[in-house]
Amino acid sequence: MLEKTFDPKTAEPRLYEAWEQSGAFAPTDDPNAEPFSIVIPPPNVTGSLHIGHALNNTLQDVLIRFERMRGKAALWLPGTDHAGIATQNIVERQLAEAGNISRRDMGREAFVEKIWEWKAKSGGTIVNQLRRLGASCDWSRERFTLDEGLSDAVRKVFVQLHREGLIYRDKRLVNWDPHFQTAISDIEVEQREVDGAYWHFAYPLEDGSGEIVVATTRPETMLGDTAVAVHPDDERYKHLVGKAVRLPIVNRPIQIVADEYPDPEKGSGAVKITPAHDFNDFQVGKRHNLPVINVFDDYARINENAPEAYRGLDRFAARKKVVEEFEALGLLREIEKTRHVVPHGDRSGAVVEPYLTDQWYVDAKTLAGPAIKAVEEGRTLFEPRNWDKTYFEWMRNIQPWCISRQLWWGHRIPAWYGPDGKAFVAETEDEAKAAAREHYGRDEALKQDEDVLDTWFSSGLWPFSTMGWPEKTSDLARFYPTHTLITGFDIIFFWVARMMMQGIHFTGEVPFKRVFINALVRDAEGKKMSKSKGNVLDPLELVDEFGADALRFTLTAMSGQARDIKLSRQRIEGYRNFGTKLWNATRFCQMNGCARAEGFDPAALQVPLNRWIVGEAARTSQAVTKALDGCGFDEAAGLLYRFIWNVYCDWYVELAKPLLNGEDATAKAETQATAAWILDVILTLLHPIMPFLTEELWAQTAGEGAPRSHQGFLMTAPWPELGEDLIDKAAEAEIGLIIAAVSEGRSVRAELNVPPGARPDLLVVEANAAQRQILERSAPVICQTLRVASVQMVDRAPDGAIPFVVDGATLALPVAAFIDLAAERARLSKEIATLASDVERTAKKLGNADFVARAPEEVVEENRERLAEAQAAKAKLEAALQRLSSVG
């Protein structure tokens, strides 16, 4: 007999260890099995499980468990990303705290060794946390982006792209993090709104005839100005185009150019141009062939290209000095306070600078062409489909991809420099030396590039490098292209696009056939979770409190809510109660002798109730299969919830009680076998979403005749394939009538406050012969479930009877003897008036365009939900009042 409750704390680790030890996570070696593969979006080795990971990995696990049970060779390949800047930051911080040691004090080799030591101790944290969630990855194939095999793939890709002219070195502007002294990607830049100012500076015309006023939020960059730009149609400045101003402080003449970039309506209409320190200015500079003067060093201090008094100053100290000097010169025209967006490094917190450096770039535009075509032709599909628009927008406007990072942790760029600075790109140092010997005619000392590659470069190879490419491995032949990628919309460009470009270029095939974009998880009010707000929900704490299954079901059930999931503890608790409901239903079956029967044939049942539940199971099985096949995770969860809670637990179990306790031995035995068979179907269908609870119930109820796999686990049992032949229309109509009669009767009792102990008769006033026969035959179960004294056939309803219609039949409950009709009318009228007031007030608020525009989105949505609920409640009470009015 089952324990009274399921204990996830003891069951989950026991079950997971048994699964993993059995080898059940590995794909079957059956050569006839259809391959189905997913590669995990590799979490950072620095990371720990957050709620976004929990959602993303739950959906992957649901899909892989589903396909595994369908008999496919299902591979979910796990691994982690070395996360260059994040990992280096952690170890640098630890060294600083331990003894104020910097990486440069240690030297590159010792520092990298220190990071490997940290990775060995702490790098597996998130992997173990994924196990707690129930992730059924094939851990025997786990990879790391700095594994030897993956590093070989990275070097080969770099060298090949360089030989094809698709990787090159160039001097361009990058996002520069002065704290880490490295270029960073756009995804590592966080835009923060801060208090600042526009400083309005006057630049005197070179000929002394006047001045042009420019405004800037970064006064220190004026030290590198090389032009002032005005719009060609701006009448105020047409006569000045081609002339020059004398740059104050620096005392250098700079030209006035006409360009489309300045907005005549904004400020003075004149813009200072600093090509080395602003992305827009850089483009203006290219169009007009302007000098490019970099006035910062790697630490964002002023360098030797600025006047001597500024050299060595931090950029913000230089800002203050520039403003003071402009004021002293009488050239500061205005200081306009403002709040504006400033880019910050997401890990360092430092203000990011556009910075001119020599970096390695990929010709992303050339690689993007085939990747765009693959989605246009449907070889890779986005789900939901609208995300392909985001993909196309980014890909069609793609810029050169800066792939070099000034870090020590990562894939070292395979380029070696000769004494004259010539680069020799090769997979090994020996190959580089051979190329240098051929070039110089002698051996020369070579120095390897100090930089490492952007993390996205190696993770862009993930779908095929993890399977052994460039070697022609059996995994690559069997599991590439992968089938489905599940990821967040925020990295469509940074990761999905990279994988598409590189996968197609190096394998000739798309890396995945389908990309499912999962939702964002927010708090119960729809707000973004953050530590500062104190609204972060830790998935591991939630697993401790409610169990992994409850969290998994919640995330799955809510995964279809557009981009956002409003997650609350109450919702998770509700789905834990769902699991408890199933546990209790299983205990009920055990206590009533429901067990698997050898040779059970669901198509040969005699009892209408059993034929009905088998048909409901068939419908649910078909619908859940279709939903999961199309990544309709929320739809699948909703179907299962309805079938398990409402159909099986609420109705079938309730309606089966008279049969299980009755004198008809044949009907009892059939019902016991049917209940057990349906329970098997339920456990199998629910397993991908709630693996622990279902596996435990399966193990506890297993008997002779159980459909088992060779490992003995539910997770490898066959997926139910129940056909249309199991749907019995006659049984459906019969049980449907009983359920409708009981449901509507319960509504009448609840709406009119009929006491629970009251036992009126159920009167059948108008019904066809078949309906009368069903209701008469089912009288015992109707009396028990509706709490009525009897089911009686009558020609007309007496006074004080409340009529209601189900499936065309008119039934009635004579309740006048149990309630005060006048008092009930008064109560209903009062409640309706209160709800009408709520509806009017909320509708008025939502009808206010100013409120809808200004209120936070979650507040507006909350009001819409409140209005809908009040309207529904009001309509229900009005119907009840109308019923009362009909009885006089």
Image (cartoon, grey):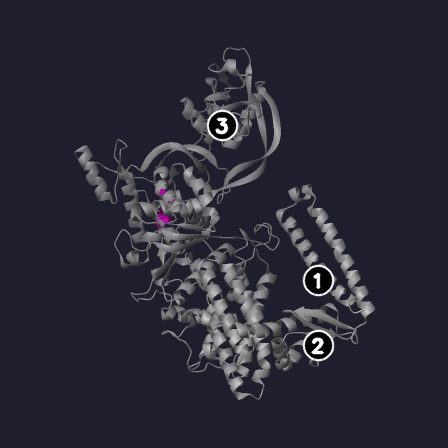
Left or right for 179, reference 501: right
Mark 3 vs mark 1, foreground winner is 1
Where on the picture, by quarter, is residue 567?
bottom right
Q: Is residue 361 above or below residue 246?
A: below
Q: Which mark is residue 876?
A: 1
Q: Where in the figure is residue 431, as x and y percent of width and height?
A: 21, 42
Mark 2 vs mark 3, foreground winner is 2
Q: Nearer the viewer, residue 94 or 745?
A: 745
Q: Is residue 48 above or below residue 720?
A: above
Q: Residue at x 50, y 83 (%)?
A: 670
Q: Where in the figure is residue 525, as x and y percent of width and height?
A: 62, 53
Query: Magenta residues, as a range?
Result: 452-461
Q: Where in the figure is residue 318, as x and y percent of width and height?
A: 51, 29
Q: Is residue 746 magenta?
A: no
Q: Is residue 453 magenta?
A: yes
Q: Residue at x 47, y 47 (%)?
A: 387
Gap between marks 3 and 1, in whole Å? 68 Å
Q: Which mark is residue 221?
A: 3
Q: Nearer the viewer, residue 219 or 792?
A: 792
Q: Nearer the viewer, residue 230 or 202?
A: 230
Left or right for 25, reference 256: left
**Would you say residue 455 is visible in this rendering?**
no
Left or right for 416, reference 333: left
The residue identified by callout 2 is 763
Gap between marks 2 and 3, in whole Å? 88 Å
| Mark 1: amino acid | Lys
Location of the C terminus by quadrant is bottom right
Q: Earlier in the sequence, mark 3 or mark 1?
A: 3
| Mark 3: amino acid | Thr
Q: Which mark is residue 803?
A: none
